[in-house]
Amino acid sequence: MLDQQIDYPSRPKTSAMIMKFCQITLVVLVLLINLAIAFPSWAEKEPSLTSNADYFQVGQKVIWLYKPRADSSDVQRIPAEVVKLSSKQVQIKVYKHNHEFVNRWVNPNKLENSQKVKESVF
């Protein structure tokens, strides 16, 4: 009697399939919720020159609002050209009087689009 083996019913394979299906469903649900929340940020907005560094393009003509000293109220408007873009700063090329130029990294908030300035003058 002790030699007899007792057959236990094996767990059906469907439980593993159900768990895999639940995991996939959860991932898809999280992805859809993320897209629903992020979708309004895809809406086109008018680019702001003072708050969006991505608006500047390499080769674009800009006006650098330069302060010689931090405590100075005098702001000099220096024409320049965008050379490089980074996540926080923009490198510009500033021309000197002797036909040479100097590259400077500046905060995008200190730059204006030169076309915008020309339009406001006329």
Image: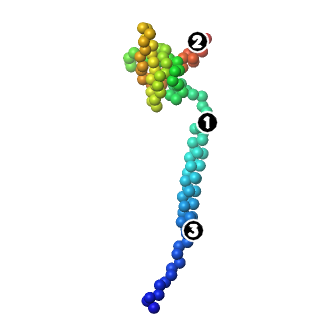
- Image quadrant holding the C terminus, namely top right
- Disc 1 to disc 3: CB gap under 8 Å: no
Residue at the extreme front: 3
Residue assigned mark 1: 43
Residue 67 visible to an observer of this rendering: no
Q: Which residue is drawn at 57% across and 60% down?
A: 21
Labels 1 and 3: the sequence-earlier one: 3
Rounded to the nearest angstrom, the CA distance separating label 2 from label 3 is 75 Å
Amino acid type at circle 1 is: Ala
- Residue 96 shown left or right of residue 46 in the figure: left
Mark 2 vs mark 3, foreground winner is 3
- Mark identifier at residue 121: 2
Amino acid type at circle 3 is: Thr
Q: Say if 43 sits above or below 48 in the image.
A: below
- Mark identifier at residue 14: 3
Q: Where is residue 42 drawn, in percent x and y?
A: 59, 37
